[in-house]
Image: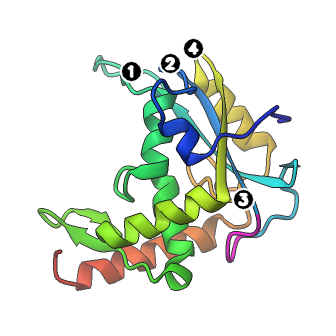
Amino acid sequence: MRPQRFYSASEVSVRPSPVPASGGVYGWYFEGAVPGVPTDGCHSWAGRMLLYVGISPKAPPTNGRAPSRQTIRSRIRNHYRGNAEGSALRLTLGCLLADQLDLRLRRVGSGTRMTFGPDGERRLAEWMADHASVVWVVSASPWEIEHEAIRSLVLPLNLDQNRDSHFHGQLSALRAEQKTRARTLPID
């Protein structure tokens, strides 16, 4: 909650990476406002606002399947430079910033995946590089920490486990609207 430093897109992308290849919890802090996002009650530190937390890996499946092998390093890199299909944070930010960054969610490939296209994903990555930073903590059971963080903090960009958030309905509707619109457009 009081990180000694924040990490930028360029810092987590270098090799060797400062982000450990292990399980853990990560928090996304933003400088300045994210359009349309209420921040009353959000945790702030050093001029930045904590708006989202994530984990890697997910809790182990109870159906006998193998657990995820993702790490906080792979997830953080994917959030910074991946696409909306593989990152709930990128999808959410892209929907919120659609007008400002001229982003349009589109179906790609077989038509079941949705991204903001190469140019849109690049613009979103640039925006995140300018406005978002990340911190993390290593944990063998990050799902427990995530649950507690979402329960006890105001995290308007988290949807999963966060139905009590006063922004949940509005954000869910915005994302659904963008997906519905994308389904009416030709596949890129």
Task: Give the amino acid type for the residue marked by disc 3 in the picture.
Answer: Ser
Task: Give the amino acid type for the residue marked by disc 4 in the picture.
Answer: Ala
Residue drawn at x 59%, y 24% is 142
Residue corresponding to mark 2? 22
Task: Give the amino acid type for the residue marked by disc 1 in the picture.
Answer: Thr
Residue 88 makes an appearance in the image: yes
Residue drawn at x 30%, y 78% is 182
Residue corresponding to mark 1? 62
Residues packed near mark 3 inside 10 Å, few (<14), some (14 to 19) or many (20 plus): some
- Work out whether 132 lies above or below 73: below
Most extreme residue toward the left is 110
Give coordinates of residue 114: x percent, y percent. Answer: 29, 65
Indicate the quadrant containing the C terminus: top left, top right, bottom left or bottom right. bottom left
* Label 2 secondary element: loop
Mark 1 or mark 2: name the one nearer the start of the chain.
Answer: 2
Q: CA distance from mark 2 to mark 4?
A: 8 Å
